[in-house]
Amino acid sequence: MPTDLTTVQDPRTEYPGPPKNVEVLPTPGTQVAMSEKPDCGEKSYKGSGRLAGRRALLTGADSGIGRAAAIAFAREGADVAINYLPAEQKDAEEVAAFIREAGRKAVLLPGDISHEGFCQRLVADAVEQLGGLDILVNNAGKMGKTQGITETSTERFDELMKTNVYALFWITKAAVPHLKPGASIINTTSVQGYDPSPNIFDYAMTKAAIANFTKGLSKPLMEDHGIRINAVAPGPVWTPLQEADGDKDKLKKLGESTPFKRPGQPVELAPTYVLLASQESSYTTGEIYGVTGGMGIA
Ligand code: NAD
Ligand code: MG
């Protein structure tokens, strides 16, 4: 049964505990290949016109947190362009179907954001097909197999930086000239950017960079362009990113160390993206919103 988001429930038991069935998937993981599917609000999220008529581009929106945000945005009245890797086409088509079911336009823009040329085309195509841009969600991210300092290759380090940090710069730089005062940029950072777990130093430093980029750009973007920029910092959330080149034993404990004793589900992040995208948060910029399962980002 999908959770009814309108009733009071015990949040410890509202969603499942740590996953029982885990598989280690090749990067990027896909939701179609997961035996325990994340809840991205497909059956539960109800909109109320909070993003009526907006045009949004979200990266990494075929699955996980980006998918939950994309479905919520469409149900709040936005037309939505989603970016993902070609290997994730099936997940992306499911998301497109949900966007269209909500009566909104869905634009599918597959491609690898670790290349500057693609990032520029992505923004240009989104603007052309949506007829403009009001919301940009830089959510795509790579984690993959984490190892110690001596085992980590320059190739992996480079791929992480290109995907998680350079792409953020390239896509934001390409988007700003198209964004009007009132537009909103939302980045996805992580608790890892504040309190890195062992052997995740390379991924964690990209997430720290994202938080810093968000704060550093907030003043000039507001003063010069009237654009807000904020970030969401998730805690442990059940998504394909966790299974992609993951560690089975660690996965079976996902979320156990939070006071909820369970991982978060992507749907539990969606309202924060909606709030930051909407005009309701008109006085909010340069902020990092934690949805950490109580782990904190201090
Ligand atoms: P996910 O696997 O569902 O989403 C990540 C997406 O990134 C993929 O769907 C893929 O489309 C995209 N991506 C990766 N490399 C790409 C590339 N080179 N080009 C284009 N797209 C690419 O997993 P998720 O957990 O929903 O991840 C979304 C964001 O949340 C990521 O930035 C991740 O770092 C962040 N995050 C996740 C967690 C968690 O516990 N799941 C916690 C904190 C932060
Ligand atoms: Mg995916």
Image: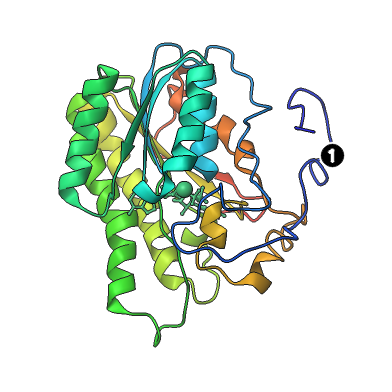
The kind of residue on which mark 1 rests is Asp
The answer to whether residue 250 is above or below residue 224 is below
Q: Nearer the viewer, residue 98 or 209?
A: 98
Q: Nearer the viewer, residue 271 or 140?
A: 140
Q: Nearer the viewer, residue 54 or 204?
A: 54
Q: Which residue is mark 1?
A: 10
Q: Nearer the viewer, residue 137 or 123?
A: 123
Residue at 77% across, 54% down: 17
Q: Where is residue 219, by image quadrant? A: top left
Residue 116 position within the rendered picture, expressed as x and y whole percent measured from the top left = 17, 49
Left or right: 72 as drawn, with respect to 7: left
Left or right: 119 as drawn, with respect to 7: left
Residue at 47% across, 41% down: 90
The answer to whether residue 72 is above or below residue 143 is above
**SS at mark 1?**
loop
Residue 226 position within the rendered picture, expressed as x and y whole percent measured from the top left = 28, 23
Scheme of image coloration: rainbow
Residue at 27% across, 68% down: 158
The answer to whether residue 121 is above or below residue 51 is below
